Image (cartoon, rainbow, N blue to C red):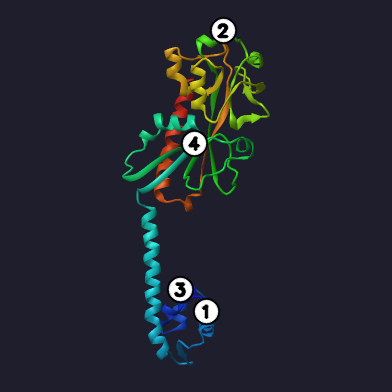
């Protein structure tokens, strides 16, 4: 026997007809043309092969089958309403898991400067996970992990259905230890080809990285091909290698302030050479997000934009 399929709209129409005992009154309450109400009812009765109402030009009444059926219809509609209310309530509770992904340096920055600014999280559990781009994503677009709610990274998403919110361009430049620079002096990016650079796997092209530098007050970047003996999949590992005098590495200036102040690392160039990388927040459309995710997302974006504005004003 073929399984019967019921549309909630049909059940709602039948329920209202049963309450009003009138096709016309039901049409008025539902805001539907009377002819369409009659058609929905006729099609439903034809599909199940049973009459729900006895209809004449003077009255409309439930059949014996209809009298038995209507309570089932009302119970089904009530369960659907309960389910819709449950989902709505769940979406508007600050309860559950919110997962934020990002490259090592960005996750470190969020942990240090952003997450503590999220107030009144109630029963939200924030999971911070490292997600470093692979070489294909760096050029073709970032994948969005299945359990991810918010991805903050340096490139646009591969999936065009996701929302990409541009935050800013942030400065990265070259660093090394004093010991390395004493042994291997360097004055400009043009000399990088003669140095051992610590490479990032996602940026690999053949056996090299391409580092871009903007000379001070210039909007035109210059590209420099750099090579080296060490290849890392995250900036934290590159930092530790650099601290052991193994080469020059590229890093976000804000993440290294404490090392620069301590004299552990030094900028390689006297002049202000910088590579300004995009910082982008990626997330699902808001209508597909639980409210807990919207709450954390809004807090993170607000904090990041406020800090970006403060950095601009300080300059």
Residues at marks 2 and 4, CA–CA distance in whole angstroms? 35 Å
Residue under label 2, please give it. Answer: 183
Q: Mark 2, residues whose alpha carbon is within 10 Å: few (<14), some, or many (≥20)?
A: few
Residue 30 to residue 202: above or below: below
Sequence-first tag of 2 and 3:
3
| Distance between the alpha carbons at the discs numbered 1 and 4 | 51 Å
Name the residue located 39 percent from the left edge and 58 percent from the top edge.
88
What is the secondary structure assignment of the residue under circle 1?
helix
Q: Residue 83 carries which label?
A: none
Image coords of residue 164 (percent x, y):
55, 42
Dot 4: what SS?
strand
Between the C-alphas of marks 1 and 2, the distance is 85 Å
Residue 14 placement (x, y as % from top left): 45, 79
Say whether disc 1 or disc 2 marks the residue closer to the N-terminus. Answer: 1
**Mark 3 or 4, nearer chain start:** 3
Residue wearing tag 1: 40
Front of the two marks 3 and 4: 4
Q: Name the residue under label 4.
A: 102
């Amino acid at each position: 026997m073929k399984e019967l399929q019921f549309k909630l709209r049909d059940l709602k129409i039948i329920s209202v007809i049963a309450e009003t005992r009138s096709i016309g009154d039901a049409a008025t309450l539902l805001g539907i043309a009377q002819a369409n109400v009659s058609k929905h009812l006729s099609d439903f009765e034809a599909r199940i092969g049973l009459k729900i109402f006895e209809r004449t030009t003077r009255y409309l009444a439930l059949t014996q089958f209809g009298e038995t059926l209507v309570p089932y219809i009302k119970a089904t509609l009530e369960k659907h309403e309960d389910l819709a209310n449950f989902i709505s309530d769940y979406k508007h509770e600050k309860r559950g898991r919110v997962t934020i992904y990002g490259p090592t340096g960005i996750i470190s920055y969020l942990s240090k400067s952003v997450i503590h600014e999220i107030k009144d999280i109630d029963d939200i559990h924030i999971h911070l996970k490292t997600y470093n781009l692979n070489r294909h994503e760096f050029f073709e677009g970032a994948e969005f992990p299945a359990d991810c709610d918010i991805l903050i990274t340096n490139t646009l998403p591969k999936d065009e259905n996701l929302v990409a919110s541009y935050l800013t361009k942030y400065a990265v430049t070259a660093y090394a230890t004093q010991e390395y620079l004493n042994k291997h002096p360097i004055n400009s990016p043009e000399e990088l080809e003669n140095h051992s650079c610590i490479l990032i796997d996602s940026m690999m092209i053949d056996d090299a990285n391409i580092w871009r530098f903007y000379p001070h007050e210039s909007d035109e970047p210059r590209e420099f091909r750099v090579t080296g003996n060490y290849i890392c999949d995250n900036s934290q590992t590159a930092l530790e290698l650099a601290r052991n005098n193994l080469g020059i590495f590229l890093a976000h200036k804000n993440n290294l302030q404490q090392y620069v102040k301590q004299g552990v690392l030094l900028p390689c160039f006297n002049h202000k050479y910088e590579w300004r990388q995009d910082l982008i927040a990626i997330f699902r459309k808001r209508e597909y997000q639980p409210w807990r995710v919207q709450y954390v997302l809004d807090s993170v974006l607000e904090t990041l934009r406020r800090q970006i504005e403060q950095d601009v004003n300080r300059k």
